[in-house]
Image (cartoon, grey):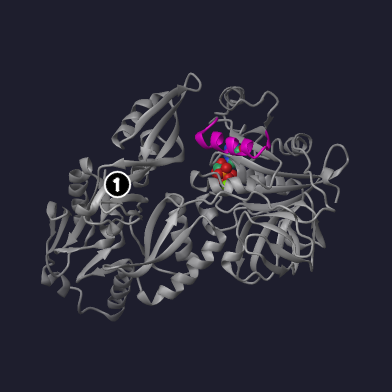
Amino acid sequence: MNNNNIRNFSIIAHIDHGKSTLADRLLEYTGALTAREMQSQFLDKMDLERERGITIKAQTVRLNYEADDGTVYVLNLIDTPGHVDFTYEVSRSLAACEGGLLVVDASQGVEAQTLANVYLALDNDLEVFPVLNKIDLPAAEPERVKQEIEEIIGIDAHDAVLASAKEGIGTREILEEIVKKIPPPAGDPAAPLKALLFDSWYDQYQGVIILVRIFDGTLKKGDKILLHSTGRAYEALKVGVFAPSMIEVPQLSAGEVGFVIAGIKEVADARVGDTVTLFHNRCATPLAGFKEVKPMVFSGLYPIDTSQYEQLRDALAKLKLNDSSFSYEPETSVALGFGFRCGFLGLLHMEIIQERLEREFSLDLITTAPTVVYKIHKTDGELLEIESASRMPEPQYIDTIEEPFILAHIHVPNDFVGGVLALCEEKRGMQREIKYLTPTRVMVVYELPLNEIVLDFYDRLKSLTKGYASLDYEHLDFRPSDLVRMNILINGEVVDALSLIVHRDKAYFRGRDLVSKMKELIPRQMFEVAIQAAIGNKVIARETVKALRKDVLAKCYGGDISRKRKLLEKQKEGKKRMKNVGNVELPQEAFLAILKVE
Ligand code: GDP
Ligand code: MG
């Protein structure tokens, strides 16, 4: 194929600005999908994505477009997720492209992730051009938003396409811009194969599928390929493209994007960022690859039914292949038994993994409240990294504790600045900058402990700004902090899965709020249940759940069979998310109550 006729591009945008809808329009316009086949947001393949309206896994599709100049171009569209937790996936998709379509909602303007994603694109040397979407909305202000793009981002927007992905306005203009503004891929099809493995996942029927961007050389069906990082060789059994369903092609050459199925069995062998080359004709130097991303938020996952442990382990291994930013290791909890400590990029990432485990693998799980990584310098000089409060040593063995800090960029209309500053201060933040981007939009920059962000920061930010604030963050460093471990005791027993690490100044209030929250959540049982919060031996708060009166239960007996069965089924439902701790039944919510304390 002639490289001059290929364009590889991503759509980048802040969440909800219309990437996925625009992708649908491009597919429809180029005939990749007929209107009848068209399912809204085709590229959001997972049910979960469709329900939540967000794009989780980046997807790739090949389109054929006959341009005004009479040439038929091959356009490879690589969809990317826009949420702050998935910056990693965005950056690896971008590495496979030459250009980026910057979609900005004309009724909203530039948001925190618009900026973050543009910077990622520019870091990858992409040609970026803006498209103003949602011009059908009465609130659209294309001229104001053009000015914002020029002032805040610093790219030319005077001839930005005005589009409505919803109504199909501007679709052809966008396709023309892609052809004219994005450079064709470089690369020599005759050179030794050099391809970037930029995504991989496990398919139940085909095994491991890898997505590659060929930078040099040609990859044919039947070739013996070599994965650089592991040094292992495989036969390319199938080579193809998504158009948008999988079709085989005889070969992929320099500049092209497609999939390879090569009988790779080991989950760990298809590493994203790896270089694919030919066994008998290797490229001299591998591609730069990607920075290893480190999970920053951790939580314990335990099967409610202990017999599902093996199933959970297999499911985690499969998910890990589809998502290399996620990590897990076995963990045992006195309260919850055998489970796994899992690492995520952020809270949304965590929720999505948990939901996928339950839906796609039919597992019932108890999840513990999320924590971050702490560095503990012990008095004997040892350095511990812990991601679970239950692993924190006794205070007398601790010299100093460090916690991770982030740099948060918050974009907010000026009416809400006061509230945002108060929230950041409450969360132990340190102000770095307040800047008026336009007369009405303000950028607030704060250094904040990640520990406070994983609590309820994002929800609070959204509600106090009526949804108008947007947030993006990056990791800064670890800093010493006065942190203590707080234990929760149920009838005198420490529930390890409920222990948490808090700042000393906040411990008293957190403890008090937490036990009163738990009192509401724990159902009454046959006996009294005492809930206590303690630091070391010192109890700082206590509440009691009174015992049930016997005659309340008595009422449940007798009556007709079907009612009884219904009652039993209902109880079973209720049991689903209950875990016995000692002889007390704790609901899932109790394990997450830590999150909701204000
Ligand atoms: P993404 O998060 O960037 O992928 O955004 P989506 O494509 O999922 O769109 C977010 C919401 O905006 C959905 O409810 C879409 O129906 C809506 N939307 C997308 N494009 C347009 C548009 O041009 N006009 C209007 N009025 N709504 C749109
Ligand atoms: Mg989307």
- Taking depth in this image into account, of 139 and 86 the one nearest to the observer is 86
Q: Residue 499, position in %: x, y?
A: 25, 56
In the rendered image, residue 57, in percent from the top left (x then y), is placed at 58, 54
Query: Where ligand 1 lies, by image quadrant?
Result: top right
The amino acid marked with disc number 1 is: Ile
Q: Residue at x 64, y 56 (%)?
A: 274
Q: What element does badge 1 sit on? A: strand
- Taking the spot 75% from the left edge, 39% from the top edge, the residue there is 175
394 sits to left or right of 15: left
> x, y percentage for residue 505?
21, 40
Q: Quadrant of the C terminus?
A: top left
State the extent of the magenta-drawn residues as a range: 110-128
Q: Work out whether residue 40 or residue 444 is closer to the camera in this orientation and state it.
A: 444
Which residue is the extreme one toward the front?
380
User: As drawn, is 62 to the left or to the right of 59?
Assistant: right
- Residue at left offset 61%, top offset 48%: 92
Vertical placement of residue 67 versus 294, above or below: above
Name the spot of residue 177 as percent of width and height, x first. Answer: 75, 35
Between 492 and 398, the one lying in front of the other is 398
State whether residue 5 is above or below residue 259: above
Q: Residue at x 44, y 33 (%)?
A: 410
- The residue lying furthest to the right in this view is 70
Q: Is residue 303 visible?
A: no
Residue 547, located in which quarter of the rendered image? bottom left
Q: Which residue is under mark 1?
A: 401
Camera-side residue: 175 or 101?
Answer: 101
Q: Count neighbours of disc 1 (C-alpha within 10 A) and say few if under 14, some if 14 to 19, many if 20 or more.
A: many
Q: Is residue 473 above or below residue 432?
A: below
Whether label 1 lies within 8 Å of ligand 1 gets the answer no
**Residue 313 appears in view:** yes
Q: Please, what is the dominant secondary structure of the magenta stretch? A: helix
